[in-house]
Amino acid sequence: MDRLHIVGGNTLRGTVRISGAKNAALPILCASLLARGDSVFRNVPELRDIATTAKLLEHLGLTVELSPGCVAVHTGDSIGDDAPYDLVRQMRASVLVLGPLLARQGRARVSLPGGCAIGARPIDQHLQGLRAMGAEIALEHGYVEARVPGGRLRGAEVHFDMVTVTGTENLMCAATLARGRTTLFNAAREPEVEELARVLNKMGARIEGAGTSMITIEGRAELQPVDHAIIADRIEAGTFMVAAAATGGDVLVDGVTLEHLEAVAIRLRQAGVHVEREAGGIRVAGKPPFVATDVSTAPHPGFPTDMQAQFMALMCLANGRSTVTETIFENRFMHVGELNRMGAQIDVDGRTAIVHGPVRLQGASVMATDLRASASLVIAGLVAEGRTEVLRVYHLDRGYEHIEQKLAGLGADIRRVQGED
Ligand code: EPZ
């Protein structure tokens, strides 16, 4: 498995172009199941999760052509109905085919995604909503066995017990071809949900309210294929913003809109980082030590859980005591142990990590355990004294396109080496 070798101490300067949003591309690619014909998706990042989604769609009978930054999909008259365990276990977002399959053909057999490093991550809300729309769902031998008596879902009022991003996306897709109107209450407001609604409406759906907590969908008889360019990845952008500040740098994070990162910008400014719109991106400049800042993750427009680990790395360089509270996932502090091995002083008390700073981080060999934990270790390595080796870089490759090239382009001393293990 590949590793990243980083020698800390370089200041990041220059411009970095942000790639398309992974968490928008995944539901949008799955939505191509809803319409017969040829769709084209542009600005799609070249990531492991995109390749996995392509394999899943091909398994379901679609033809998928991946070229740099672009995915062409042909959906025929008949499609499969099963998403097998060996694909779903690689990427839990595979559950996003459930809504489209039930909408399109009234049956689906999708492996339960199981838990992952950051938590149990059940899909009960997805299933509850689909049942409300008329699906009969049984859980057998680790699979969701779903069918729609009469073949077509019916519109319903769906109340989510908690905000769920892919739950909202699955139900929104399912409702586009249902009979009648569906209303989603307590829906997720993430920009990626809005982007999916934008694409579905281009396909002929009638969705209103995406980006708010109440979304209405008028079911249609069929949808049309689409040609669409995906929005930029706000979490990749936020990651580079933190890296720029942590190294005392000055970087233009290009191609992303600040409005998708307001909560992150507010906390960075509070910590003493300069953040402002510039041209088609965001200018970020900072110099340690920072102002100790408390943050608590929340559904959008709150502080994103996907930026929690990166922000924690920054607070290691702040004067005094900062608290980082994770309210979304039950086990998303696995980067703490590795940061402490690099000289950080972080205590965990339940869902809150207390970060004492500033500390002088030292390079070390560290292990990544999930996508964003890996990113926080890379940021720590950029500022640590000496050399850091980040193992299991495949976690990073799931969500960051060419991360070492982009960082090296900003002046970081970083390179990928083929791992022995
Ligand atoms: C999406 O995951 C993202 N993934 C995650 O990004 C992100 O961290 C998460 O939303 C929160 O913003 C994609 O969009 C592909 P949830 P998702 O359903 O939809 C509980 C990354 O780093 N819940 O919003 O799986 C759940 O356990 C990834 O790119 C239920 O209990 O997250 C969690 O505690 C990591 N039952 C909370 O809700 C359900 O049916 C929020 O989960 C659904 C969710």
Image (cartoon, grey):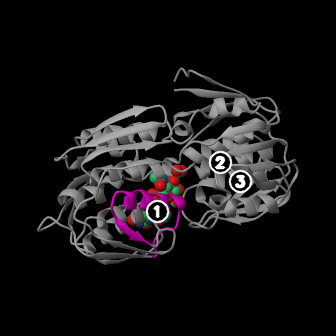
* Disc 2: CA contacts within 10 A as few (<14), some (14-19) or many (>=20): many
Is residue 195 part of the magenta span, yes or no?
yes
Q: Indicate if the residue with disc 1 has its beta carbon within 8 Å of ligand 1.
A: yes
Image position, residue 151 (x, y; %): 14, 64
What residue would you read off at disc 2?
Answer: 237
Q: Secondary structure at mark 1?
A: helix
Asked whether the residues under the numbered discs 2 and 3 touch, taking CB atoms below 8 Å apart as contact, a structural biologist would say no
Image position, residue 166 (x, y; %): 42, 60
Q: Amino acid at mark 2?
A: Ala
Q: Residue furthest left?
A: 150
Please, is residue 382 above or below residue 232 in the view?
A: above
The answer to whether residue 361 of the structure is visible from this angle is yes
At 46% from the left and 62% from the top, the residue drawn is: 165
Comparing labels 2 and 1, the label whose residue is closer to the camera? 2
The answer to whether residue 120 of the structure is visible from this angle is no
Q: Viewed as shown, does residue 368 lie left or right of 73?
A: right
Q: Which residues fall within the magenta stretch?
A: 186-208
Q: Amino acid at mark 3?
A: Phe
Measure the C-alpha gap from mark 2 to mark 1: 19 Å
- Count of marks overlaid on the render: 3
What residue would you read off at disc 1?
Answer: 165
Is residue 219 part of the magenta span, yes or no?
no
Q: Secondary structure at mark 3?
A: helix
What residue would you read off at disc 3?
Answer: 311
Measure the C-alpha gap from mark 3 to mark 1: 22 Å
Q: Viewed as shown, does residue 252 lie left or right of 61?
A: right
